[in-house]
Image (tube, helix red, strand yellow):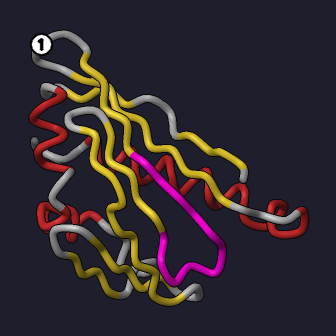
Amino acid sequence: MTQYESSVKQIPYSQERVYAKLEDLNNLEALKGKLPEDKVKEFTFDHDQATVDIPPIGKVTIKVVEREEPKCIKFEAVGSPIPVNMWIQIIPDGSEASKMRVVAKAELNFMLRGMIEKPLKEGLEKIADTLAMVQY
C-alpha cells in the first residue's frame, strides 16, 4: 500500500471541538453546498458512513472503522474500485487551535499508480481544504 498525505491545515478551533464535529458524519451536512456539483452527483450520510456518487467511478461509501478521541478518525472505502483506507489526524496547537492532516493508503499497481496518483493527491488536498473551512 502506498501512503498519501495532504498538507497540514491550521484550524482556529480546539482539537476536542474539531474531533467532536468530525466524528459524527451527520455533521457533513455543512459541506453539501461546498462540493463541486460537476464532480459529485449524490452525497448521503449517517453517523458512521458517507456515500458519494462520483462519475465515472460510481457510488463509494466511506465508513468509520475506528475513532481515537480526540486525535484521529479512521475510515475504509466500500465499493471503491481500489482498496483505500483514510484517516483524519487532529493535533492540538495551543488550547484554542489545532492542526489537521488527511492521510490515505491505497493499494495501486504500477499502471494504476501512474493514472490515479495525481488525482488522489489533489483529492486529499481538496478534502483537507474543505474540512479546514468548516465552522467548528
Residue 26 image point, x, y percent: 13, 67
Per the rendered image, the range of residues in magenta is 77-87
Task: Tell me which residue sits at (62%, 69%) in the image.
Answer: 83
Q: Is residue 73 above or below residue 8?
A: below
Residue 92 image point, x, y percent: 24, 19
Residue 112 image point, x, y percent: 81, 69
For the image shown, how many numbered marks are present on the structure?
1
- Seen in the image, is 23 located left or right of residue 79? left
Task: Tell me which residue sits at (44%, 43%) in the image.
Answer: 102
Q: Is residue 15 above or below residue 44?
A: above
Q: What crowding class fits label 1: few (fewer than 14 Cα within 10 Å), some (14-19), or many (20 or more)? A: few
Mark 1: secondary structure: loop
- Seen in the image, is 53 located left or right of residue 95? right
Given residues 42 and 79, the one toward you in this image is 79
Q: Which residue is mark 1?
A: 95
Given residues 76 and 22, the one toward you in this image is 76
Whether 35 is among the magenta residues is no
Residue 115: name its quadrant: bottom right
Whether 84 is among the magenta residues is yes
Three-letter code for the amino acid on which mark 1 is drawn: Ser
Image quadrant holding the C terminus, namely: top left
Q: Is residue 91 above or below residue 51?
A: above
Task: Tell me which residue sits at (57%, 53%) in the image.
Answer: 122
Q: Is residue 16 above or below residue 28?
A: above
Residue 117: name its quadrant: bottom right
